[in-house]
Amino acid sequence: MGALEELCNSHPRVLEEVAKLQLPKGYQIRNDPWIYGTDDPNEKRPLVQFFMYVLAGDGHSESNHYSLPLKFSPVFEAYTNKFVRIDYLPGGFDEKTTPTQPWQKVPCVEYHPDLNNETIPRDVKPLLISQPEGPSFKVEGSKVTWQGWEFRVSSSAREGFAVYDVNFKGRQVFYRISLSEMTVPYGDPRAPYHRKQAFDLGDVGFGVTGNHLNLGCDCLGVIKYMDGYAVHPNGEPSVIPNTICMHEQDDGLLYKHLNYRTNNAVVARKREFVVQTIATVANYEYIINLKFVTDGSIDIETRATGILSTMPIDEDVTVPWGTIVGPNVMAAYHQHILSFRIDPAIDGHKNSVVYDDVVKLPKDDKLNPFGIGFVTERKFVEKAGHIDQSPFTNRQYKIINENKINPISKNPVGYKIMMPARQMILADPDSFNVRRAKYATEQVWVTKYRDHELYAAGEFTNQSQNDTGLGVWANGIDPVRNEDLVVWATMGFTHIPRVEDFPVMPVETHNIHLVPFNFFDKNPALDIPQANNNFNKSILAKVDTKSEPSACCKTNL
Amino acid sequence: MGALEELCNSHPRVLEEVAKLQLPKGYQIRNDPWIYGTDDPNEKRPLVQFFMYVLAGDGHSESNHYSLPLKFSPVFEAYTNKFVRIDYLPGGFDEKTTPTQPWQKVPCVEYHPDLNNETIPRDVKPLLISQPEGPSFKVEGSKVTWQGWEFRVSSSAREGFAVYDVNFKGRQVFYRISLSEMTVPYGDPRAPYHRKQAFDLGDVGFGVTGNHLNLGCDCLGVIKYMDGYAVHPNGEPSVIPNTICMHEQDDGLLYKHLNYRTNNAVVARKREFVVQTIATVANYEYIINLKFVTDGSIDIETRATGILSTMPIDEDVTVPWGTIVGPNVMAAYHQHILSFRIDPAIDGHKNSVVYDDVVKLPKDDKLNPFGIGFVTERKFVEKAGHIDQSPFTNRQYKIINENKINPISKNPVGYKIMMPARQMILADPDSFNVRRAKYATEQVWVTKYRDHELYAAGEFTNQSQNDTGLGVWANGIDPVRNEDLVVWATMGFTHIPRVEDFPVMPVETHNIHLVPFNFFDKNPALDIPQANNNFNKSILAKVDTKSEPSACCKTNL
Ligand SMILES: [Cu+2]
Ligand SMILES: [Cu+2]
């Protein structure tokens, strides 16, 4: 990236534009190299576009250039480093652009503590997490053993990490779980923004942009780190140190029942084992947490943070496709559409996918005279394809093993996939955005397992013109019932930026849960020791500074 | 409850039925008194029905009677204690019942550690949460101050607790937030199960059934407790000790950005302040957590746990409205439909409710030639009523203050309500289930503020025939734009029991987030000190028992 940035910033044509800005003393130029995207089927050159920014902060390296976007965007040919052209960026409602003008000084919205003018830091007291007897997990090479769970963790230059060979209480549950792709299409229709569609795995890679994680910052408690590996442009392998962290955490109560007759309670805490990685894709950060829970469930969590990709906007202009997040800076609406590849092995590799809707039982004088009955209706996925979302019928997606009947419930064992219904990709079906990312049009896909089918939009996404992943594999032909199959869960969120997302964005968190459904013959967490304070050593807070009459005696406010 | 149970169990007609069971030695009878529900507009007597169970475990008080339901259900008149009749319960697919037979011995699925046969407890190491410098919060009477938040907590016999006068960083945000009602209708159409529709607040009360919370069990860390108050049947006030607990917790990362050029990062941890109560409504437990976050957001979390309400089922029978969760025991499908009352004060009491949909921009040769644009469309709620859900347009509900314009984004300040789209009540629109709980038909309601309008289904729900709450107040007449208004958020989940939910259910967790949306002029959490390990004191785990060749060098599994 450094070489590319330098190429652009030192090119005579770029310097010529920069000169026109007549930047005041103490201000410099910075650029973000960007994926070029696709808008022309005849464009075969490998291209890079650059978004240009003013660097304020009197040269402070951590000044937030995203707050000061400029209105020109150089385009170069990659590898040959040839200058192609300069695109000019609109500042008003339409596509009209203007020649580069002297820069109008506006305040920079800074995030770094050196610069952000937050002079009264909040008074936060330490909250320490310790495990005096050591953690409950074991790691042997890539193999993790914890609380009935056994699995392997593998770093991946493209995916960040994958877990595989996942067993719980001695039974196979998943063969491999990984993030498979993420596309980020923007909704600003004005050229050249129409080309803003990143594929953060295929174009960039979550492993190669993986952060070096730090104790007490990214990970709290007693932490085990793993390195990742990537390949240098020169072909040599390189290490990404400590890019995966693993630890245990408490997440409140797992179950409780109080017998009101005797005042005796059973109480178990919810303990989780977290496998975390964080990727920095230029402006954005993505935190991927795979959380293994003591009740046999898995929580796939994505947290988006970092800095919005910004555009210049003229004074006194508003646009219906973006939020003004600072002086003369706009963040366009966009979507983050992630595909998680879930390769199941529910008691073995021959699995089926079903979806269960909950529907009213017809009113019936004999069976349902009061009209209150409801039942589930099950449908099977027979051929490779997708399943529509249907939140209002409480549609639940399940991976089952038809060869293995639960002795209690008397139906096949399975895991359910709990994922909220979401808006999928908004672009027109015939747009490049959609043709390149068919996976982003539906939330649940099922394909037959084949080696090397790992990436939802296909292997090569940079300047691609068509999806060569699920767009091809979900072919309506391959039988997937009682077969070795793969489920692809598309988690999308339409990001309407808020002012509070700037200059650095509080996490937006999205979860997919994989939950045993008639897989065990009872709650598999009954063997967890009951919670007690000899073990947990919690204490009373001494914080009541004043004794006031209790609120309960006041009028009901 | 004890007196009612005794009344039933000692009544000659009940003893007569019990005798017919010819229970083996060591087995006893237990009953659960149940809300009678409504199925007859002419029934004016206050009634109680009893579900009868066998108590196994050789008389152990914690034996799980819900595992051994019996097939008769006595009905009594409340207050007069008059015996009314015995209903007989079906065991097959239809409503056919049989006279009481000698009880067929089946194993009891036990949860209590004394009885559950879990002989190899899991090896869980302690995970301690400590605050050596004390917590970051202060409590003065009912007033809590923490990290820019100020609010009061009030216990409530009906609601459990409410928070009110909620301010963040010196600005009003909410006047009062509380659980307002929960109804639990069951989908089993067979008599007398068609009457199973509890109103857990209106019929029972979340405060009066509030648990005495314990250190290291229900609450981890440094804990502040508050008592609740109720009224004895004799009219005397009674204390429910320690029924609300409050503490701080860490919830991973709040924001991060790494400047890839310099490898410098800003990292802040997400700290939450939790106000928790737990209510035991006979078989079920509900955990209500109100979490205040350092970024100005509030997370309203509900966790359902406890024991399923069960029915007897004959050997070799399955039903489409229930799951067999143990030998001869079935848990019917049902819904939990909660109404949270959110009384906003977004920079004052004159607020408006809007909903924003994200829609495609029409393809247009000039403005949107590539068909990738999308924009938001805003609609206002003008009159008291409801808003439909619309997840596929990414519909977002916002409470805004039209009198207060955000100087950065140039539109009104507000908070958004993030709630997943859910199936609402399944019963027929003309059923008693729906007529009694209109609030359960829609997910977002807006009414004009009026004193004493606190409970979504109305004040009196026990054996009610009509909703006297939102069914009346959401009248399509009251103006609610730029008014003192109340939002009612209905969080529902259709519970299709799994075998793993028995004999005690791992939590099912559901969240509503209240998030500042163009309320502040930037991320309000920039004043949080950056995370570092001098403060957080995390350590490396020494857990690698063996050095294996790294997984990354293997083929891509
Ligand atoms: Cu975003
Ligand atoms: Cu339930």
Image (cartoon, coloured by chain):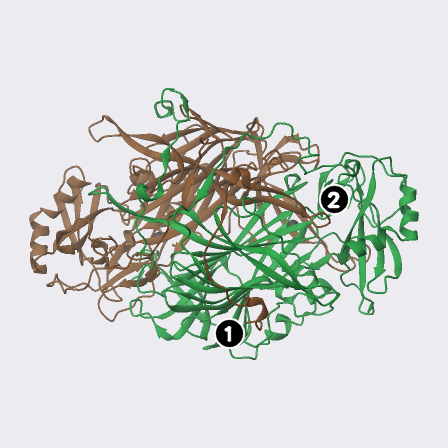
Chain colours: A brown, B green
Mark 2 falls within which chain?
B
Amino acid beneath label 1: Leu
A542 left or right of A206?
right
Who's the residue at 36% across and 46% down the image? Answer: A183
Above or below residue A548? Residue B268 is: above
Q: Nearer the viewer, residue A326 or A381?
A: A326
Name the residue beneath numbered marker 2: B66
Name the residue beneath numbered marker 1: B485
A467 left or right of B500?
left
Q: Position of residue B521 (x, y in %)?
A: 31, 65
Q: Residues within 10 Å of mark 2 (few under 14, many from 20)?
A: many
Who comes first in sequence, dot 2 or dot 1? 2
Who's the residue at 61% across and 70% down the image? Answer: B470
Q: Tell me, for residue A4, which label it has, or none.
A: none
Above or below residue B329? Residue A118 is: below
| Mark-to-mark CA distance, 2 and 1 | 43 Å
Looking at the figure, which quarter contains the N terminus of chain A? top left
Mark 1 falls within which chain?
B
Looking at the figure, which quarter contains the C terminus of chain A? bottom right
Amino acid beneath label 2: Tyr
